[in-house]
Amino acid sequence: MKQNLLETFIGFLVLGIALAFLIYTYQVQNREVTEEYTLSCTFQSVDGINKGSDVDIAGIIIGKVSSLTLDPKTYNAVLTLSVDKKVKIPTDSRAAITSSGFLGGKYVSITPGGDDAFLEDGAQIKYTQSSINLESLIGKFMYSNSQSSQKTSTVQPEQAK
């Protein structure tokens, strides 16, 4: 009987610790919520970007990608970014999809411009650079090397004499 009581007590203790941990993580997560404003930008390709991908300036995360949609007229990808309200972005800034390392994930990097006016809530970043498809570049490189090696290995009959 004493062993059953001890096991029951330890079970309640473990559940209490788990509940305390959940409450703590919920409170910490809610503290990080800041006021945000939205910006949009249009890209030809957004390979590797998903909802929740980071938005940064100079390596500092300032927001997240809140949605990705397809423009039905131009077939370009339209990203909606949620940016911290404390960060003021000049109107002539540039947005680019960048990779964090050779095999790392992709994120939206904003390079601030020099304009004195700032983007307001709902504004669009006009200057964008799309994602680079690494697999396509490697394929082009390999194909161009195989073509050039075939040309150099072929000996013309007139040159052989």
Image (cartoon, rainbow, N blue to C red):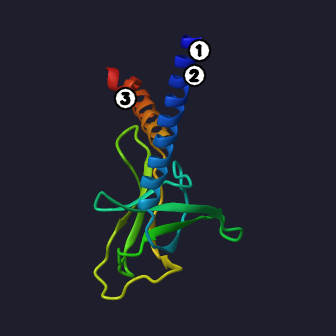
Disc 3 residue type?
Thr
49 vs 1: above or below: below
Residue contact at pointers 1 and 2, CB within 8 angstroms: yes
Q: Secondary structure at mark 3?
A: helix
Q: Nearer the viewer, mark 3 or mark 2?
A: 2
Q: How many angstroms separate mark 1 from mark 2 (CA)?
A: 6 Å
**Above/below status of 4 relative to 59:** above
Residue at image x 50%, y 81%?
Answer: 121
Name the residue at 59% across, 62% down.
67
Between 106 and 153, the one nearer to me in the picture: 106
Q: Along the line of sight, which residue is nearer the eye, 155 or 103? A: 103
Q: Is the residue marked by circle 1 packed among few (<14), some (14-19), or many (20+) residues within 10 Å?
A: few
Q: Which three-letter amino acid code belongs to the residue tagged 1?
A: Asn
Crowding around mark 3 (Cα neighbors within 10 Å: few <14, some 14 to 19, many 20+) is few
Q: Secondary structure at mark 2?
A: helix
Q: Which of the numbered marks, if any, corresponds to residue 8?
A: 2
For residue 105, the mark is none
| Residue farthest toward the bottom in the current orientation of the protein | 117
Q: Which residue is mark 1?
A: 4
